[in-house]
Structures are given as structure tokens and as C-alpha cells.
Image (tube, helix red, strand yellow):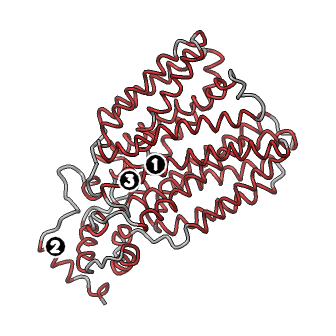
Amino acid sequence: MSIRAIDEAPLTAFHRKLTWACAGGPFLDGYLLSIIGVALIGMSGELNLSAGDEGLIGAAALVGIFAGGLFGGVLTDRIGREAMYTIDLMVLVGVSVLSVFAGESWQFVVLRFVLGVAIGADYPIATSLLAEWVPNRHRGRLLGILILSWYIGAAVAYVVGYVLAEIGGVGMWRWMLASGALLSAMILLMRIGTPESPLWLVNQGRTADAQKSIEKALGRTVPIGDLVVAAAAEQSLARHRFRDLFQGVYLRRTLFCGLFYMCQITPMFALYTFGPAILGSFGLGEGNAGNLGSALISAVFVLGCLPALRLVDRVGRRPVMVWSFALMAVPLAVLGGGSSLPIAVVIVCFCLYALLSGGPTVLEWTYPNELFPTAVRATAGGVATSISRIGAAVGTLLLPISLSRLGIGATMLIGAGITLVGWLVSLAWAEETRGRTLAETSAVPGGPRNSSETDGQRGAALRKSGIERS
């Protein structure tokens, strides 16, 4: 289904405000996932946490993200983007506040799991809401800003952790967790008034509500008859269900989105772990200074996203994806030389990888939203997130084992191999979606198109629209 008032609209203050409101969720996700790593140092000593306790607290969020991605997207497609966004941020606020007062390891495990569920759900919620509001020619860049905000949130968490530790030492860990609660509340207040997606409303047959939403946000009146026709087109297609993501063309698209996402973040998580060790060579990896080192790592990944934000809408999604994966494998292969490499070469390779990874990074949330129809758009985004987190969890678990048994060189070569798998997946399955409507990008090749209707369909739809028009 296509709404020209949205697809062809100029970029307005509303779009910018909506982008920042939607970016607040990912920013908060990066912050909350990172601040616990800083706080855990003080928590461990004060609460007498064992290594097993620390591992469970760290893993709980990853397991939660898997579950949240898997089921959060389904709920978002059923009850709405705006409603789920409000619920999700309220959960983040509540869990963040409770974390400040928790005193037992099991309490932190439970809270981190619930936090992970909310974070995993946030990815498809925020991205589907924004994707269904923004004009075609700006969609790739604006969706890329959301993933950019995740890295900024992570960097800010390490800086805040550094400042608080400098002020009061590691005993400030409860204040670190309190900072997350404060930010969660601020972002919840910031996004009050975010309108529901007209595409979702039309998909539900709520054409009058969609008309009001568009008029309020964009100042454009879309004839109710056009929206009724669009609703009829949506509902004339087969009703999409969760299992449809694993059939036919949608199976290929689901595998593509999940696998390239996994191949992108698995080596990235490894370098996040390897990065502080590199910075330690310069005295930045020891004590509280290590938090600044981690902030610098996030900053380099942010820089890599900036040129990619422009290229995805100018050059196209497919070339950015394919070339980025191909080039990302090169510095990882060089790092396969191991500890014998000069430190300057190691740092250059690290920075090159971070900069080149911007392409797949900014497309992590763009492709799932463009390749699937409204009825399962958020569900598809959630499934892609869940698949990717399998790689992240396995990579995080096996990295220390690989470093100790195989060495840094072999570990980086494994990362290069995973990156090349991402290149092959992209080369085979990446579709070009630049400048096209969501109706066009999500349509099944050779199948019925939901962006155009015959006069007969229009007449039939209008005859059925008595309730909505009244």
C-alpha cells in the first residue's frame, strides 16, 4: 500500500522531531547496555558477586534481547507502533528505577533480562514507526540515524561512567544506574504525542484515523476514498502471519536480513572486546581510563556511519552493502598476522574496519522495514534482531576461548571469514530498494502489487466504505 502524501512529502520539522523521538529508544538501548559494564566493577565488590554471577548478569540482557525481538515485533504489528513504543519505554523506565535499589545478584539477572526484552522489542518498534512516516528519498538516511544513536548512547554511557567514577570511585555504581533511569524518563516524556503510523492504521481498516493522523502531522488532507481503496488493497492480499516469514520469497528475505546482521555484529562485538586491549598499549585500557577507551571505540564506529548515511540514499543500498562487506574483510585479514604486527598497523586496521562497517550498520534496520509488508514489518525486524543476537551471544562466549587457545591472529581470521560470509549473502540476496515506496519494496516479484488498484477495485472498496465514511 502506498500513500503519496507521505511518500512524496518534503522533509519537514515533523519528520525531524519524529526521527529524534524514535532515535531516543536506540540511544537509550546503547546507554543501558553499556552503563552496566561500568557499574559492574563497583557492584561486584560491594555485593560480593562471583564470576558466575557477573556472567549471568551480562548474559541475561542478550537472552532478553533475543526474546524481545522475537515477540516484540509480533505485538507491534498487532496492537500498533505508537502504543507499543509507549509501553516499551515505560518498561525501560521501571526496570531502570528498580535496578537502582536491587541488592541481590538474582534480582539483577531478572531485571537485566526484562531490560533486554524491552530493548529487543524497541528495535522493530522505533524503526517501523519511522519507516512508515518518512518520504522515500530520505528513508535510508533517517533510519540509519537510529542505529547511529545506539553507538552515541554507548559512548555517552562510558563517559558518564568515567566522570562518576572520577568523582566518587567505583562505589558510585548505583548513581550510574540512576543516570539510566533519569534518561529513560526524559526520553519517555520526549516522545509523548508521537502519532500512530498511517500505514498500520490503514492496514487495520481504520482509514478515518489514518486521515486525521496525516492531516495533523503533515497538514495534508488525503481523500478518505483513497485510503479506503488502499485499505482494500492491503486486505485483499493474503493475511500475513508469522510463519509467512519462513516461506517463499519472504524466507529468502528473512535469511538475508538475519544473516547479514549476524555477520556484521559478530566480528564487531569481538573488536569491541579487543579494542580496549589495543588502547591499553597507550595507557588507556587500565583502571577508569578504560571507560574513555571504550567511548573512543564507539566514536570510531559512529564516524564510520556518517558517510554511509548519505550513500545509502544516493548510491543505493545494494552497492553500499556489498562493497562494505568486501572491504571490511581486508583489515581483519591483516590482523590475522597476530601480535607480531606493529601496533600502528593494528590500530590502522582497527580504525579501517570500524569506518568501513558503517554500510551494513546503517542498513541493519533499513532492509527489514523495506522488504516486508505492513502486516509483518515489525515482526520481520524483530526476527532479524533475534537471529543477529545468536551470533553476538556465541561470539561473546567463544571470543575469550578463541583468544586463549587459538591466539589473536587466528581469532581475527575467523572474523574475516564471518565477514566474507556476509559479503556472499549480500552478493546473492541484497535487493535495491532506494527511492521506492514501501509497497514496491515489500511486494513479491511477479505477485499482486498493493500499490495500484483497478477502477473495479476502487468502486468495490468505496461501496464497502459506508461505516468509515460516516
- The residue lying toward the viewer, choosing from 40 and 352, is 352
Indicate whether 8 appears above or below 64.
below
Dividing the picture into quadrants, the one containing residue 314 is top left
Tag 1 residue: 383
For this orientation, the residue located farthest to the left is 455
Tag 3 residue: 369
| Residue at disc 3, secondary structure | helix
Disc 2 crowd rating (10 Å Cα; few below 14, some 14-19, many 20+) is some
Under mark 3, the amino acid is Asn
- Residue 71 lies, in percent from the top left, at 51, 55
Tag 2 residue: 457
Total tally of numbered discs in the picture: 3
Under mark 2, the amino acid is Gln
**Where, quadrant-wise, is the N terminus in this rendering?**
bottom left
- Residue 186 lies, in percent from the top left, at 64, 64
- Residue 345 lies, in percent from the top left, at 54, 17
- The residue lying toward the viewer, choosing from 328 and 414, is 328
Left or right for 284, reference 270 = right
Q: Are marks 2 and 3 in contact (CB under 8 Å)?
A: no
Q: Are marks 1 and 3 in contact (CB under 8 Å)?
A: no
- The residue lying toward the viewer, choosing from 18 and 231, is 18
Tell me which numbered mark, 1 or 3, is placed earlier along the sequence: 3
